[in-house]
Image (cartoon, rainbow, N blue to C red):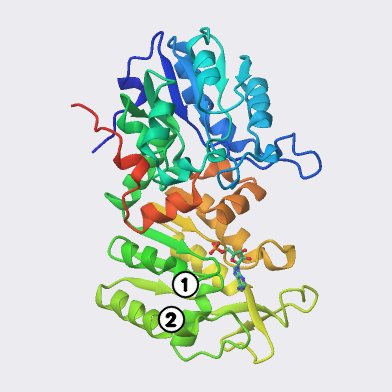
C-alpha cells in the first residue's frame, strides 16, 4: 500500500515540519564545512516543492551521536549554510529544536524562508521516542513530512513519534526509496539477481534468508564468502571466517538448492599475507594457502558474476566484493559495479560501501536507484517494517 505523499497534503501557508537526514560529514579541522553534501541535495526536491506550494519549511535532523548533550562540533549550522547555497533561499538557524524561542521563530517564519532546527539528538528524549518531546516538536508545525529514509528504521521522536501528532506524509525522497524497494521485493521483474558482499555473514544472514525465495540467483563476495566456502570444505587460510556460522552457511546453501535457486561463490581470489600487504597480492584459484587471506574476488569470478548478470531484469547490490578501500584490493568491487551498471536491469544499490564504490567509478547515472540509507535499506531487505514508514498514513484511494 502506498503511503500518503507530499502531493496529497495541503501545505499552502502552512508550517511544514520536515524530518530530513542532514547527518553529513564535516571537515575534521574546523568542523564548519560540509565535506559531502549528497544527503542535503537528496532532500532538495521535497524542500523546493514545499516552498513552491507556499509552505514554510521547518527542517529537523540529527548529526552524529551527541548522546543527548549539546556538542557544538555536531551543530547543524554548517548544513544550514550549505543548504542556503544550494537552494538559493535564506535559511535561519534556530538555537535549539524545541522551546519558546524556537516556537516564536517557527510562528514568525515568513514565506520564502527556511528554518533549520538544531540537532534533535542534543536532547536525550529524541532517541527514546519520548512523547512529550515529540509533542514539543509537533507544536512547531501544522503538518509533518518525513523525507529521512536514512533514519526511517529508528523509532525516534522526530522520525516516528511526532507523526502521531500532526497530519503526516512521506516526502519525495522517502517515496522514491519505498517504491524502489517495493519494486525489487514485491514484484521483481525476472530474472532477479542479488549481489551481497561485505565483512560479516552474521550481518547479512537475515537478508539472505529473506531474499532467497525472491531472487533467481544470489552472488556472494567480500569476506562473507569465506564462511560459505569453508562450510563447503575449502581451505580458506587466514581469511575472515565466522566459525560459529559454518553450519548455518551450509544450511543456507542447501535451502537454496531445494528452492532451485543458485548461490554463486568466488572461484578465484586475490590473496595477500595481510590487509596491509598490497604489494604482495596475487590471484589464486580454489584453496587459499595457509599463510594468505582473501582480500578480493579474482578476475575469473568477476567474469562469472558479469555473465550471471547478463540478461537480468532486476539487480540488487549490497556490500563490497573485497577490501575496496585499498586500490590494490578494489578491482573485484569495481568490476561488479561496472557489470551492474551495464546490465540494463532495474538496479538498486544500497549500503554505504557499495554506494561509495559506484560513486568512485562515476557509475551513479547508470544505476536506477542509489539508496540513501545503509541501515534502513538492510532492514527493508530483511523484510522488517520500518517504524518511520509504518507510522505514516496510507494514501487514500
Ligand atoms: P559491510 O559493512 O558488512 O558491508 O562490510 C564492508 C567492509 O567489508 C569494508 O570495509 C571492506 O573492507 C570489508 N571487506 C570486504 N571484503 C573483505 C575481505 N575479504 N576481508 C576483510 N574485509 C573485507
Residue at the spot 38% in from the left edge and 43% down from the top edge = 180
Q: Position of residue 285 (x, y in %)?
A: 60, 84
Q: CA distance from mark 1 to mark 2?
A: 8 Å
Is residue 187 at all visible to an observer of this figure?
yes
Q: Nearer the viewer, residue 158 or 131?
A: 131
Vertical comparison of 277 with 47: above or below:
below
Vertical comparison of 26 with 9: above or below:
below
Vertical comparison of 134 with 226: above or below:
above
Q: Quadrant of residue 78?
A: top right
Residue extending farthest to the left is 397
Q: Position of residue 142 (x, y in %)?
A: 37, 17
Q: Position of residue 357 (x, y in %)?
A: 62, 54
Query: Could you classify mark 2 by the number of other residues whose Cα lies within 10 Å: few (under 14), some (14-19), or many (20 or more)?
Result: some
Q: Quadrant of residue 281?
A: bottom right
- Say what secondary structure mark 2 lies in: helix
Residue denoted by label 1: 201
Residue at the spot 43% in from the left edge and 84% down from the top edge = 246
Q: Position of residue 265 (x, y in %)?
A: 47, 76
Sooner in the amino-acid sequence: mark 1 or mark 2: 1
Is residue 171 at all visible to an observer of this figure?
no
Q: Quadrant of the N terminus?
A: top left
- Say what secondary structure mark 1 lies in: helix
Residue denoted by label 2: 245
Badges 1 and 2: C-beta atoms under 8 Å apart?
yes
Q: Nearer the viewer, residue 289 or 30?
A: 30
Amino acid at each position: 500500500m502506498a503511503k500518503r505523499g507530499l502531493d496529497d497534503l495541503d501545505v499552502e501557508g502552512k508550517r511544514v515540519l520536515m524530518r530530513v537526514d542532514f547527518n553529513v560529514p564535516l571537515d575534521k579541522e574546523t568542523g564548519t564545512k560540509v565535506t559531502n553534501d549528497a544527503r542535503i541535495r537528496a532532500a532538495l526536491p521535497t524542500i523546493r516543492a514545499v516552498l513552491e506550494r507556499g509552505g514554510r519549511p521547518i527542517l529537523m535532523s540529527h548529526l552524529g551521536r551527541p548522546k543527548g548533550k549539546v556538542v557544538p562540533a555536531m551543530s547543524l549550522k554548517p548544513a544550514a549554510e550549505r543548504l542556503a547555497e544550494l537552494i538559493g533561499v535564506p535559511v535561519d538557524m534556530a538555537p535549539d529544536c524545541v522551546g519558546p524561542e524556537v516556537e516564536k521563530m517557527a510562528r514568525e517564519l515568513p514565506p520564502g524562508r527556511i528554518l533549520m532546527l538544531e540537532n534533535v539528538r542534543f536532547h536525550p528524549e529524541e532517541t527514546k521516542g519520548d512523547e512529550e518531546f515529540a509533542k514539543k516538536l509537533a507544536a512547531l508545525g501544522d503538518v509533518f513530512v518525513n523525507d529521512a529514509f536514512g533514519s526511517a528504521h529508528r523509532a525516534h521522536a522526530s522520525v516516528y513519534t511526532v507523526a502521531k501528532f500532526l497530519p503526516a506524509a512521506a516526502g519525495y525522497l522517502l517515496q522514491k526509496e519505498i517504491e524502489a524497494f517495493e519494486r525489487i521485493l514485491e514484484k521483481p521483474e525476472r530474472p532477479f539477481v542479488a549481489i551481497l558482499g561485505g565483512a560479516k555473514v552474521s550481518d547479512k544472514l537475515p537478508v539472505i534468508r529473506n531474499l532467497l525465495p525472491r531472487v533467481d540467483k544470489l552472488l556472494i563476495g567480500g569476506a562473507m564468502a569465506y564462511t560459505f566456502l569453508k562450510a563447503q570444505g575449502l581451505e580458506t587460510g587466514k581469511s575472515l571466517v565466522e566459525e560459529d556460522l559454518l553450519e548455518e552457511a551450509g544450511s543456507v546453501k542447501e535451502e537454496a538448492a531445494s528452492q532451485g535457486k543458485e548461490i554463486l561463490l568466488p572461484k578465484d581470489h586475490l590473496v595477500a599475507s595481510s590487509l596491509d600487504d598490497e604489494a604482495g597480492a596475487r590471484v589464486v584459484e580454489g584453496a587459499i594457502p595457509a599463510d594468505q587471506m582473501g582480500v578480493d574476488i579474482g578476475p575469473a569470478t568477476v567474469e562469472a558474476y558479469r555473465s550471471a548478470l547478463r540478461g537480468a531484469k532486476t539487480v540488487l547490490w549490497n556490500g563490497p566484493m573485497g577490501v575496496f578501500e585499498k586500490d590494490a584490493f578494489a578491482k573485484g568491487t569495481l568490476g561488479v559495479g561496472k557489470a551492474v551498471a551495464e546490465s540494463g536491469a532495474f538496479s538498486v544499490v544500497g549500503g554505504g560501501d557499495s554506494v561509495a564504490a559506484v560513486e568512485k567509478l562515476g557509475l551513479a547515472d547508470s544505476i536506477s536507484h542509489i539508496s540513501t540509507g545503509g541501515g534502513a535499506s538492510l532492514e527493508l531487505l530483511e523484510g522488517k517494517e520500518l517504524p518511520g514508514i509504518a507510522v505514516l498514513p496510507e494514501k487514500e484511494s
